[in-house]
Image (cartoon, grey):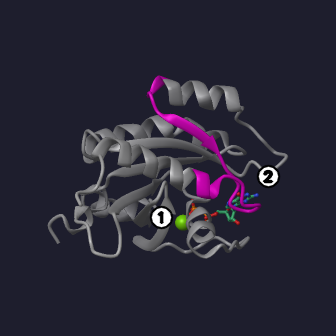
Amino acid sequence: MADYYVQQSSECDYLFKVLLIGNSGVGKSCMLMRFSENQFTNHFYNTIGVDFKIKVFQIDRSTVKLQIWDTAGQDRFRTITSSYYRGAQGIIIVFDVTDRESFNQIRQWMQEIDKFAAEQVNKILVGNKIDSSQRRVSTDEAEALAKSYNISYIETSAKTNINIENCFSLITRQIIQRVGKPKQ
Ligand code: GDP
Ligand code: MG
């Protein structure tokens, strides 16, 4: 296993492991489905333990292969925590703009990340479900929270496909900026 995910392979310039983190129900699996297969469902995806998808895409003339990990985050899967975080270069922390509690939990997720992830990991905060009229968290307060952690904030809808690609591009660009150009 070691650090295969940081190696470069012949068919891509970069290979990164990125995690989706956040309360159950915020739309992590739908974001991943939208990004990897351009599909959406109104049903919950039954993520058991962890699941990952591979997506290869072009960014600023580089070919990037993202290995995106998704977890159900239930307590009974807590034992997966350290292997889930191991080798991750980017973390997408998601809350649901219609669910205040999922926003309040961000602090706990950040504490978990501090405990298990590498110090230099890139993080972004995402407010999902902006298609809904039931918003309970304003853009301003989410931006303020992101700023307090010195990370970027972006709002998305997996349902209507708003900013989903931008969200994955944003984290990827930040990782590339940190790790530098691939060796020729
Ligand atoms: P997860 O537990 O974080 O993986 O959440 P899911 O991806 O399973 O989504 C939970 C529920 O939220 C499902 O009923 C989805 O259809 C719904 N959902 C996910 N993304 C959106 C979105 O962008 N807008 C709306 N309105 N509903 C969404
Ligand atoms: Mg899920």
Q: Nearer the viewer, residue 3 or 75?
A: 3
Report whether residue 55 is seen: yes
Question: Is 31 rendered above or below residue 111?
Answer: below
- At a point 18% along the width and 64% down the height, the residue shown is 3
Q: Which residue does the image show at 55% across and 48% down from the upper left? A: 94
Q: Secondary structure at mark 2?
A: loop
Spot occupied by residue 68 in the image (x, y as percentages of width and height): 43, 65
Image quadrant where residue 36 sits: bottom right
Q: Ligand 2: which quarter? A: bottom right
Q: Residues within 10 Å of mark 2 (few under 14, many from 20)?
A: some
Residue 157 position by quadrant: bottom right
Q: Which residues are magenta?
A: 148-166
Residue highlighted by disc 2: 131
Residue 67: % across, % down? 39, 67
Question: Helix or strand or loop: what does disc 1 sit on?
Answer: loop
Q: Say if disc 2 is inside 8 Å of ligand 1.
A: yes
Q: Which residue is mark 1?
A: 72
* Magenta stretch encompasses residue 153: yes
Which residue appears at 32% of the width and 52% of the height?
A: 89
Q: Quadrant of the N terminus?
A: bottom left
Residue 22, x across and y down, in percent: 50, 51
Indicate left or right for 138 with 173 as reference.
Answer: right
Q: Given the image, on which type of amino acid does mark 2 rest?
A: Asp
| Closer to viewer: mark 1 or mark 2 | 2
What x and y, as percent, mark residue 62?
A: 42, 60
Q: Amino acid at mark 1?
A: Ala
Quick check: 7 left or right of 153?
A: left
Q: CA distance from mark 1 to mark 2?
A: 23 Å
Q: How many marks?
A: 2
